[in-house]
Image (cartoon, coloured by chain):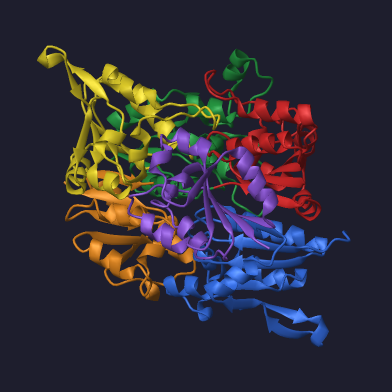
Chain colours: A orange, B purple, C yellow, D blue, E green, F red
Amino acid sequence: MATLHTVNKSPFQNQTLISCLGHTKAGDAVLMFEDGVYGATKGTALSDAVAGLGADVKLYALGPDLAARGIDAGRLADGITLIDYDGFVDLVAENDRTQNWL
Amino acid sequence: MATLHTVNKSPFQNQTLISCLGHTKAGDAVLMFEDGVYGATKGTALSDAVAGLGADVKLYALGPDLAARGIDAGRLADGITLIDYDGFVDLVAENDRTQNWL
Amino acid sequence: MSEIIKKFLYVNRKAPYGTIYAQESLEVVLIGAAFDQDVSVAFLDDGVFQLTKGQDTTAAGLKNFSPTFRALGDYEVTKLYVEQESLDERGLTLDDLQDIQYEDEDDDYAEKPSIIVVSRAEMADVMADQDVILSF
Amino acid sequence: MSEIIKKFLYVNRKAPYGTIYAQESLEVVLIGAAFDQDVSVAFLDDGVFQLTKGQDTTAAGLKNFSPTFRALGDYEVTKLYVEQESLDERGLTLDDLQDIQYEDEDDDYAEKPSIIVVSRAEMADVMADQDVILSF
Amino acid sequence: MKFGIVVSEGPYTHQASDSAYNFVKAALAKGHEIARVFFYHDGVNVGTRLSIPPQDDRQIQKQWTALAAEHKLDLVICIAAAQRRGLLDENEATRQGKDANNIAEGFRISGLGQLIEMGIQCDRTITFGD
Amino acid sequence: MKFGIVVSEGPYTHQASDSAYNFVKAALAKGHEIARVFFYHDGVNVGTRLSIPPQDDRQIQKQWTALAAEHKLDLVICIAAAQRRGLLDENEATRQGKDANNIAEGFRISGLGQLIEMGIQCDRTITFGD
């Protein structure tokens, strides 16, 4: 009985990613997309916080939104899985519910 | 040659107030209005940061927006001046320019 | 209206008035009440500001929708989960919120509080126990 | 078109694509260039993301407006202030940004960089030196 | 699996309607059913036929209208949110004494109950917003 | 003193247009001049005459139309932003082959140059947005 959480806002501007990660349960999935993909990069002021809070969840980032923003796969933080819209659809189907953090 | 800065977002959700206060000059004025008025209250997780960063600027909060949100004057942090729209207009006129932090 | 009973959670994380989400969320909750589902409403992060008492929108020229929260009990929406940590961070206590009650028909219509203060961990449990989550 | 010359600053603090502000800000800068004012453009906070190179919006189905930044020099918009602290917090360096240049007509049309990296304190100085500040 | 989609921000201003469109296309391609797309908040503005985007940009309303025609999608615009924002069909315009309407082909205006019904009937409900 | 005002978010969705309205009224009452109000981004949606807000709520478009009539305000809607969002006057509708228009009385559609010109000519420029 796991949940897919989605986050679409930049964590540098908005507290939503931090709040989301504070409300996940072990085994949940968190997808970062739209401006949320900035939370998936390494070497930032927030990388450690994201890695720490997201320790027992699976973290994903949406490839098309990374590409739009010029973030290549080499800048993704460890433990982040890159997916496309097919993968997004699969995540929704595989998890029991979706919680969209707006 | 002073600037009036306006902030209209809740500092608990959004980094804008912190960024604004990091870019003010001594003698500037900062007006918190709309959801920005939450930054003017005392006893919060952010009160110390606002008081520290805003030390050499004049801090204002818009009364009508405080009232709409049920914040009575007793909850305002020290050093915050309560104004209405007339006072808002005066601040714009008295300062050399207005920078709206959106 | 429906034979399926699902657990619906409406999640409120935004302050009122600066944006319309709080008000239009409440409109969904009211309409949704007619569908006889198992309804809960969550208030966390800036969403806790929606429930503060003493809101007076006259000078700002806005519509004050906060009295509607007190009518939720009449619509059998009686589980309003409010996160303690969100209150603490914002310098709020339960006393700063409206007193929202409902009449418990299973207990001789005794008046009971609709607001249930929960910890962040308990809020996560509430969220993980739903069928449908609508966020505003 | 005007005999008054004012200092105009366009402030960009938001990331591209998630919202339209970055794109519609650029449209204002382009139109504003026709008015022969003293124009500067500031990129700070998430606004620095607007200038990253390698943006490819094909799979997301959006319009890629990032090449337009390289055309700003042709419109005599040559002062693009980028805040160092904003880059640092986001794990970016100048190498991650597009190479934006202009031809300096006062220096035999030599190609010069339009991006000026400044500290937060210097950005505050730039802001305090303006007549009109438009924020996006 | 049966999906219900909520779009709660306007076109171009936010990426929400683009993301929803890409998601719906991918879900359909995988054989899932899209039971309904419900437009709420500023999302109702996706359904105006009067928008004229730049020719070199995507045509968001036309994309949805075409996808709806191809896959018989039920695109529902919330009436309460639409009235506030000036999005009307011919019936509403007549009823409210307005001299014009602006809804695009493939969209219909209905009540918030359609959102709740969608949540009840679908296996998954996903919101694209801000 | 001469003020120029920018409104960059839509009505009801954000408080921006309410705050701008209150500010303009207060400035006029103090004897200041409002040289122009420029509607950009979603702010263009303030100028639709098709909106039907609940009767117990403020009527934002009508408030602006009335204030403009009383004080001869110049309410300018940006054409580029308006086209994207489906806000048209009769001329634009004809020129673009659209079968309806939705602009309200008291507003006019013009180019972004009007924003720059406002900044040049006014003593102060203030933006209400998000």
Count of numbered tags = 0
Q: Residue at x 25, y 36 (%)?
A: C94
Find residue A46 and report its horizontal and vertical position in percent: 35, 67
The answer to whether residue F90 is left or right of residue D79 is right
Seen from the viewer's position, the closer of residues F31 and E87 is F31
Picture quadrant of residue E63? top right
* Left or right side of B78 for F49: right
Q: Nearer the viewer, residue B3 or A43?
A: B3
Q: Is residue C28 visible?
A: yes
Seen in the picture, residue D76 relative to B18 is either above or below; the reply is below
Which residue is farthest top? C108
Residue B83 at x, y = what percent?
Answer: 55, 42
Query: Is residue E33 among what the camera can see?
Result: no
Q: Is residue F13 above or below residue B29?
A: above
Residue F96 falls in image quadrant: top right
The residue sitting at 76% across, 71% down in the picture is D76
* Depth order, front residue of A87/B93: B93
Can you give x and y, in whole percent of width and height, for residue B5 in the image? 58, 55
Q: Position of residue E120 (x, y in %)?
A: 28, 29
Q: Residue at x 33, y 69 (%)?
A: A47
Q: Residue furthest left?
A: C107
